[in-house]
Image (cartoon, rainbow, N blue to C red):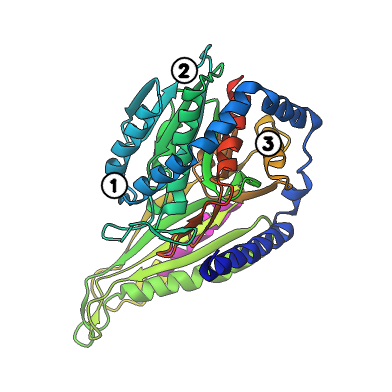
Amino acid sequence: MNGLTNNFLAFQIMSRWLILTFLVVTHAPLLLAQKIEPIYTQKVQELVKDTRVQEAFAYIHEIDAQTIVDMITLTEIESPSFHEAAKGKVFMEMLRQAGADEVWTDEVGNVIALRKGTNSSKTILVEGHLDTVFPFGTDVSVKQRGDTLFAPGISDANRALAVVVALLNTMHEKDIRTTHDIWFAGTVGEEGLGDLLGMKHLFREGAHPLAAHIAIDGGAVEDIVNAGIGSIRYKVTFKGPGGHSYGAFGIGNPHNALAKAVAAFVPQADAFTKSGPKTTYSVSVLGGGTSVNSIPYESWMLVDMRSESQERLQGINQLFLQAMEEGLKQENEIIRRGAPITLQVEKVGDRPSGTADPSSELIQQVMAAAKFLSGNDPVLSAGSTNANIAFSKGVPAVTIGRGGIGGGVHSLDEFWINKDGYLAIQHALLLILMQGGF
């Protein structure tokens, strides 16, 4: 193992220690509820003794090299949110070759493969997302140095897509069928302003009912997301007539209005977020204006607010909206001439929060399987993933890891190391068998 890889492994070990320390401090209630009931441990032990499961586990090992090839192939296809079609076509063909009974693309671009159950009274969704945070023009070619693969998007979430293909391939080749139908999918719009587009479509009113959702979009096998961090995002724009900084002095200034709105919001938000479930806010991007000697005709900002509690999220949201109106009012009160400033508030993101009870069947199954395969105690945490939608609707859901060692997510230095990566596929297979009925 070369020095570069050693450095990355050391970084991962330290990062993991810091993450666990953070979870102990901020998510103590979840950690205290991690008891695994013996019935679920026993079920996992029974499953792994089954000859068919043992053969499937061995096959996952056999196709490991092909799984990595699939991951590389998918990584090297640019797919920013809202532009996943090219990758979707390649992914669809992979699912078809893996033995799907049917494959289709839905109205928003989700790619779905069906493996029929023996008695299809329910449907279980297993998915990774197709989109990445990187714009067109990003170099997404995969480079290998030692045992480390580098490329934007390789870990989040192209590894997950390759895992989905490997799962379907394994069940097809080993002739494993569950009682219930399984949907293996690549979904659109998970990142950023994609705002969980694909999942919102799959869980929309009147859609085909999904009995459970297994999202693959995390880290190690024992890292389990059973709660969704909700978020609300706005683009706020103050507009005015604009004009010369001297000749038009006295007209409304959109920058002033925006500044006053932020000044009205921050003290209230600071007080609000000092207690209760973790709630955050960020004025993230600012824009507007044309030159130093011009009064701008518009001033805009992008704002992100998050919370594990839907009630707290709505609370800070209300404070924000009131502050925007207050900033508008204050600026319009001092205008000496011309038209008043106007305000446009556009919601550009709305991810609901929710939690799956640690004592629920799916989370118990996830923890039991993770403990068996990794030998480590499972860690429950909250995150912002595709599972947020199912969490918010009370549908059994979880986000599990894609395996291996990854880092640099959402950066140009993103990397992945195949350290026991097969365990994540075995983990997902056990969940599918328990949820799907085997």
Q: Label 1 neighbourhood size at 10 Å, few (<14), some (14-19), many (20+)?
A: some
Q: Position of residue 260 (x, y in %)?
A: 43, 73
Task: Give the vertical position of 132 relative to 431 (above or below).
Answer: below
Q: Label 3 neighbourhood size at 10 Å, few (<14), some (14-19), many (20+)?
A: many
Q: Position of residue 369 (x, y in %)?
A: 68, 36
Q: Which residue is mark 1?
A: 83
User: In this picture, which residue range is highlighted in magenta?
Assistant: 312-327
Residue 116, labelled with which disc?
2
Left or right: where 432 falls relative to 351: right
Q: Amino acid at mark 3?
A: Ala
Q: Which residue is mark 3?
A: 369
Q: Amino acid at mark 1?
A: His
Residue 286, labelled with which disc?
none
Q: Residue at x 68, y 45 (%)?
A: 374
Q: Position of residue 331 (x, y in %)?
A: 37, 73
CA gap between label 2 and label 3 equals 24 Å
Left or right: where 146 falls relative to 84: right
Task: Give the vertical position of 210 relative to 355 (above or below).
Answer: above
Q: Position of residue 314 (x, y in %)?
A: 55, 51
Q: Quadrant of the N terminus?
A: bottom right
**In the rendered structure, does residue 316 fall within the stretch colored magenta?**
yes
Q: Residue at x 52, y 42 (%)?
A: 216
